[in-house]
Structures are given as structure tokens and as C-alpha cells.
Image: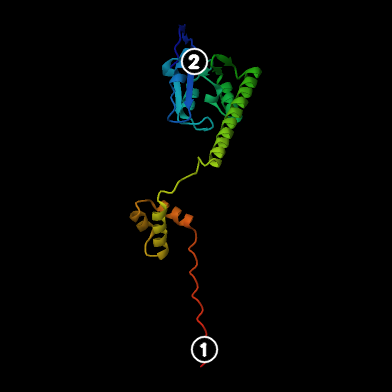
Amino acid sequence: MPHEGRTTGDTPAVTAIRVGYARVSTDGQDLTAQRQALAALGVPPDRIYVDHGITGTHRQRPGLREALAACRPGDTLVVTKLDRLARSVPDARDIADELTARGVRLDLSGSVHDPTDLIGRLLITVLSMIAEFEADLARARTREGMAVAKAKGRLRGKQPKLKPTREAQLVALWRAGGHSSHELAEMFDGARSTVYRAIQRAGPAPAPASAPASAPASAG
């Protein structure tokens, strides 16, 4: 979309614009709040670019690339929070370098930072370090919560699809050698992965019991 501006003589005067970027990590999350916040910060709805279902650590973000491509020297890229733009220090530095090369400022929820200014770059780096720390902290809390739940028996992993008696029948037929894994999957209304997991859980077949030694014939 071309920039709007007035014409002075033969040289059109280019008006700086505000380009918005919004992102959510999962498809189940809603972008409405970010869109409303960007509109309140002066970003026109048709200049808001989004990424849906993409994490901040993912380097391939089509919406972000479109937002950066839409910026021209003197424009401002607007985001509601830095973690919507980057979740790691290296990624934030790369974006700051690109903004610097384009002559574009960064507006973080109303606080404008100029990447071409040393203080502006410092603030962006510090804020990106905080965002990265918060992301690491959230992952650590998730792992800790899963460990506690697993210890309490609330998180047991993938449960068997077959009841114990049915699984025992499947394993017996497999050990008998008369059926393929595909045939067993059809017989027990499951997938071959179900058959393989049942066999794996059952472990190796028990060794057959040795026949009792016959008593020595008595001399007669």
C-alpha cells in the first residue's frame, strides 16, 4: 500500500506511517485484544500484520516479514509488547539491525525506541533479555508442574488403547506366529502402532518350561 502524502512542487512529500504487528502462539488464541491495542496506538486496521499459531522463537514468521517490508524510512513499527515481536536476545538484535538499516523506529505500547540511537538499542536489548528470561521461566514452570503431576499419578503418559485381557490375547496371537501385525490391527480394531506397543509392553516371551528328566530305568 503506497504511503499517503502531500505534493510539494515536483517532489511528493512522504508521510510517515505506523505499521502494526500482532502474534499469538497457538491457533486457539485470539488476536482481538492486540488488534484493539494497536488501533488505540494509532495503527490503521489495514496496516496490522499478524502471525497466528506461531511461537516467538520461530524465525519464519510471514506476518512479521510483511510488516517489516511495509515499513519505509521514517515509519514506526508498533507492537503491544516486545515478546510479541521476539522471545530471544539474538532474534531481537536481528530485528533491531533490520529496523536500523531501514531507518524505522519501534513503538512498544506507546514507548518509542529508535534503534539507530545507542540508548534505544540498549533498551531494546534489555527488554529482549527480560522477554527471553520470562519465556525460559514459563517453560521451567511447565516442566516443574508436569513433574509434580506425574509424581502424584495425574500424568501417566499415553494409556493403552486395549484392555489388559484383549492385549493379552493380541500378544498371545502374535507369539503364536500365525498373524501379521496388519492382521492383528484389523482384528483388534486398532493401528499397527497399537500392536507394536502391546508387544513392547509384554516384553520377551517366557522361556518354555523344560521337560522333567525321565527317571532312569531300573535294572531288572
Which sits in the foreground, 176 or 114?
176
Q: Position of residue 87 (x, y in %)?
A: 56, 28
Please state if 141 lies on the left or on the right of 165 as rendered. Answer: right
Residue 36: give its label.
none
Instruction: Name the residue carrying label 1.
Output: 218
Answer above or below: position of 199 versus 100: below
Q: Residue at x 48, y 23 (%)?
A: 22
> What distance separates the C-alpha of mark 2 from that of mark 1?
107 Å
- Helix, strand or loop at label 1? It is loop
**Mark 2 or mark 1, earlier in chain:** 2
Residue 77 visible in the displayed image:
yes
Q: Position of residue 218 (x, y in %)?
A: 52, 89
Residue 18: give its label.
2
Label 2 environment density (alpha carbons within 10 Å; few <14, some 14–19, many ≥20): many
Residue 1 visible in the displayed image:
no
Answer above or below: position of 101 versus 180: above
Residue type at mark 1?
Ser
Residue type at mark 2?
Arg
